[in-house]
Amino acid sequence: MKDFFDSTVEVTATIEQIEKDENGCYVKMSYEHDGEPYTNINLYKSNKGFVEGETKEIRILLTSPDVVYPQKTYIRDMSLRTIILVAASCSFIYEIVQYVKSKKIRN
């Protein structure tokens, strides 16, 4: 996760256009990084209600500023990884406890 934050930077993007279809909508936005404007950048396809003209905090890749990462996606992914790690750790601890119990019963 540290690599992600080292290789990206947070910017404020303005929602410029929302193209709706039967599956949801394509959100296009613009932002500025190092004095260079980036326009008509696709944030992602979503069925969530965005409003043209509102701003969103996003992260962009430093080496390629037209690559966008929605902030909430990374928080969700980080949470999912944490949950999986905790579940795996609990399973591992449970197996150790069962092994210790079985050793005590045999002795």
Image: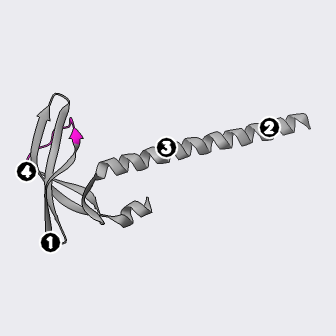
Q: Mark 3 or mark 4, which has the lower sequence index?
A: 4
Seen in the picture, residue 70 relative to 49 is either above or below; the reply is below
Q: Which mark is residue 49?
A: none
Residue 48 located within the stretch drawn in magenta = yes
Q: CA distance from mark 1 to mark 3?
A: 39 Å
Mark 4 or 2: the one toward you: 4
**In the rendered view, does 72 fall on the left or right side of 57?**
right
Q: Which mark is residue 35?
A: 1
Which of the 4 quarters of the picture holds residue 5? bottom left
Is 40 in front, or is 54?
40
Q: CA distance from mark 3 to mark 2?
A: 27 Å
Amino acid type for the residue under numbered disc 3: Ile
Provide the residue designation for mark 3: 83
Q: Which mark is residue 101?
A: 2
Q: Main secondary structure of the magenta part?
A: loop
**In the rendered view, does 31 fall on the left or right side of 44?**
left
Tell me the residue at 68%/39% (across/down).
94
Tell me the residue at 42%/50% (across/down).
78
**Residue sticking out furthest to the bottom:** 34
Mark 4 or 1: the one toward you: 1
Q: Which mark is residue 53?
A: 4
Q: Mark 1 or mark 3, which has the lower sequence index?
A: 1
Query: Percent from the top left, x then y, of residue 19?
Result: 11, 39
In contact (CB < 8 Å): disc 3 and disc 2:
no
Amino acid type for the residue under numbered disc 1: Gly
Query: Percent from the top left, x then y, of residue 14?
Result: 12, 55
Q: Mark 3 or mark 2, which has the lower sequence index?
A: 3
| Segment tinted magenta in the rendering | 45-52
